[in-house]
Image (cartoon, rainbow, N blue to C red):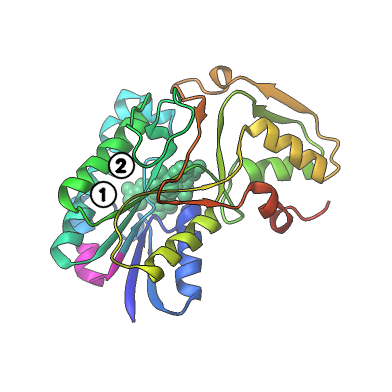
């Protein structure tokens, strides 16, 4: 049985990848968090490889706080997690003939184009996005056979995210604040994990950048409106502009993904019935 290690296994996507790969019973799956191996320490990262000798590595770990990434004092942390650690993983995977799957983001784009596919030039406008681009480039230097998946705004039941927070507030009829001028592809983390699993099953040899994202390109405010409607909630919705909501990092207002070789996944309304149980 092939062995898969998942870095960042406590993340939303990490939990879904763990569940999909382990439920298949085709792989031995080892979930790793910073408690097991601190990715800020290259020696610990190397030890994760020598301890487990994986056939496949899935990297869901990252420095994820887009606003905190702008602070000078976090610079080392951001680049170590989003660039140096994936670079080292890619290097170790090349050395051992291990398949490497890494996740990236729609924040590598500036939002000036209508849509972005896998061939679109990257142009990040915040430090987080820059660090993810640097990570992608460093991976290609070390491992041309890696898979890099770029996805949109993730939601899912296994961790806190905008959708679960809005559902929880709507169920309690509490006020919901939602940004109305930032649009992205809302994407089910479970669907991404299932799609990655299928990619590996269909063709373990494929490599390159793939966009995997939910088909609904929308704003948090629209999502919140739908949640309030579906739940017949009395929650009041307060619309907020992105510039007021986020204090530090600039965000591209429209990060509309397109797939030339990746996959468009189901929209949020198709996924809702399973995550929004009635009040
Ligand atoms: N969330 C989104 O909306 C979104 C959108 C587009 C792309 N993505 C991509 O999807 C991937 C996963 O995102 P996510 O939101 O699911 O992740 P997340 O919930 O933000 O979690 C990040 C993970 O990184 C791990 N980590 C942080 N510092 C670490 C360290 N020093 N050593 C080891 N692990 C460390 C954490 O592990 P511990 O819990 O063990 O500390 C945490 O589980 C990322 O590559 C991201 O770019 C996410």
Specify the label residue 82 is tagged with.
2
Q: Position of residue 178 (x, y in %)?
A: 66, 29
What percent of the width, then of the height, locates residue 274? Answer: 70, 59
| Separation (CA) of disc 1 from disc 2 | 7 Å
Would the CB of label 2 be found within 8 Å of ligand 1?
Answer: yes
Measured as percent of width and height from the top left, residue 190 is found at 54, 58
Closer-to-camera residue (50/139): 139
Is there any visible trace of residue 173 in the rendered image? yes
Most common secondary structure along the magenta stretch: helix
Indicate which disc residue 86 carries: 1
The segment highlighted magenta reads 47-56
Q: What residue is drawn where x is 20% and y is 63%?
A: 47
Whether 217 is drawn above or below 6: the answer is above
Based on the displayed image, in which of its 4 quarters is residue 36 positioned? bottom left
Which quarter of the figure has residue 49?
A: bottom left
Q: Secondary structure at mark 1?
A: helix
Check disc 2 and report its element: helix, strand or loop: helix
The residue lying at 32 percent from left, 32 percent from top is 121
Left or right, 163 with reference to 255? right
Q: Give the residue displayed 68% in from the left and 28% down from the top.
A: 177
Residue found at x 79% / y 39%: 228
């Amino acid at each position: 049985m092939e062995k898969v290690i998942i870095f960042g296994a406590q993340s939303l996507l990490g939990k879904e990848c763990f569940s999909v790969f382990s439920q298949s019973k085709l792989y031995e799956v080892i979930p790793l968090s910073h408690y097991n191996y601190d990715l800020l320490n290259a020696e610990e990262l190397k030890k994760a490889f020598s301890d487990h000798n994986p056939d496949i590595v899935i990297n869901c770990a990252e420095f994820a706080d887009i606003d905190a990434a702008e602070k000078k004092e976090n610079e080392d942390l951001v680049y170590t997690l989003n660039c140096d650690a994936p670079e080292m993983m890619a290097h170790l995977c090349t050395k051992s003939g291990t398949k490497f799957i890494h996740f990236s983001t729609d924040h590598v784009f500036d939002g000036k184009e209508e849509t972005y596919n896998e061939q679109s030039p990257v142009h990040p406008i915040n430090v987080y996005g820059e660090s993810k681009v640097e990570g992608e480039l460093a991976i290609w230097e070390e491992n041309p056979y890696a898979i890099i998946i770029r996805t949109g705004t993730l939601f899912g039941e296994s961790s806190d995210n905008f959708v679960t927070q809005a559902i929880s507030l709507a169920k309690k009829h509490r006020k919901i604040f939602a940004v109305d001028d930032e649009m992205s592809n809302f994407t089910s983390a479970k669907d991404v994990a299932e799609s990655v699993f299928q990619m590996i099953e269909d063709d373990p040899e494929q490599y390159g950048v793939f966009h995997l994202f939910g088909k609904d390109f929308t704003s948090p405010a629209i999502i919140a409106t739908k949640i309030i409607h579906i739940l017949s909630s009395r929650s009041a919705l307060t619309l907020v502009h992105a510039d007021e909501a986020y204090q530090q990092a600039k965000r591209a207002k429209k990060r509309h993904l397109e797939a030339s070789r990746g996959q468009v996944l189901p929209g949020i309304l198709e996924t809702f019935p399973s995550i929004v149980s009635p009040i």
